[in-house]
């Protein structure tokens, strides 16, 4: 719809570019992906606003800027293979799919997994591979990955995911307590891991074997 096209363009200009996101591939992806399709019909008019929105199951679709910031931090190339932990609405995976060769995404909540998988099919995102599982375990059969993005807050960095990064691979992950986290970027080098802090953030909990206890 023309209205959503206009709102999406305004989102990119005023929320994304205005805050310093310069990666042309990220800006192009966020101009293309219909964010309103990843929320309920009742919330579609708010889809391009500058805040997260509920998607059910006590989960959220992230604020547009944080999606852009995390994507840019991964420094993606078109032939990259990416692992996403926490499919959620599917929006972040769709943004990645516009940029890279293949996206592997894991969701532990079945209703969200099922809904996102159907949406990917309906929108023609055929380079997204989905899995219903504990994301903190990663996806060993498809390792190594050029990049890993974790879209929920972890109490610490899961070694299982670090070990699934290729040499030169990048990971972006929120780490902290249950209420606030620091957005960390890791790079796996031949000599080990380098780490940088991209600033404060707030995500829902990363639940799983190497995350928060579901109880």
Image (tube, rainbow, N blue to C red):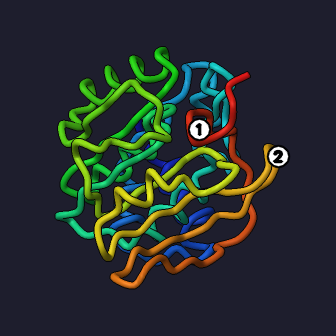
Left or right, 9 with reference to 44: left
Q: Which residue is pictured at 26% across the width and 39% down the height? A: 128
Left or right, 157 with reference to 125: right
Alpha carbon distance from label 1 to label 2: 17 Å
Left or right, 76 with reference to 213: left
Disc 1 element: strand
Residue 44 sits above or below residue 26 on the image: above
Disc 2 element: loop
Image quadrant in which the C terminus is located: top right
Left or right, 36 with reference to 93: right
Image quadrant in which the N terminus is located: top left
Q: Position of residue 70 (x, y in %)?
A: 52, 62
Q: Which residue is mark 1?
A: 61
Residue 56 sits above or below residue 206 on the image: above
Q: Which residue is pictured at 50% across the width and 71% down the height? A: 186
Q: Which residue is mark 2?
A: 179
Crowding at label 1, few (<14), some or many (≥20) Cα neighbours within 10 Å? many
Residue toward you, 195 or 17: 195
Q: Toward which corner of the image does residue 2 lie, by quadrant?
A: top left
């Amino acid at each position: 719809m023309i209205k959503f096209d206009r709102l999406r363009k305004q989102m990119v200009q005023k929320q994304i570019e205005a805050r310093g996101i310069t990666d042309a591939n990220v800006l192009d992806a966020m101009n293309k992906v219909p964010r309103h399709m990843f929320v309920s019909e009742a919330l579609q008019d708010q889809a391009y606003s500058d805040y997260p929105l509920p998607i059910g199951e006590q989960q959220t679709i992230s604020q547009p800027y944080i999606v852009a910031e995390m994507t840019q931090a991964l420094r993606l190339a078109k032939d990259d293979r990416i692992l996403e932990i926490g499919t959620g609405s599917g929006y972040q995976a769709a943004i990645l799919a516009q940029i890279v060769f293949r996206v592997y995404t894991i969701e532990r909540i079945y209703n969200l997994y099922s809904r996102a998988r159907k949406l990917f099919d309906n929108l023609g995102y055929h380079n997204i591979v989905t899995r219903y599982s504990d994301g903190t375990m990663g996806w060993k059969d498809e390792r190594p990955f050029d990049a890993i993005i974790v879209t929920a807050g972890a109490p610490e960095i899961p070694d299982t995911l670090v070990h699934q990064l290729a040499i030169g691979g990048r990971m972006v992950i929120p780490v902290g307590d249950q209420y606030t986290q620091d957005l960390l970027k890791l790079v796996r080098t031949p000599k080990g891991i380098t780490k940088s802090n991209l600033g404060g953030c707030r995500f829902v909990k990363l639940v799983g074997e190497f995350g928060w206890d579901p109880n």
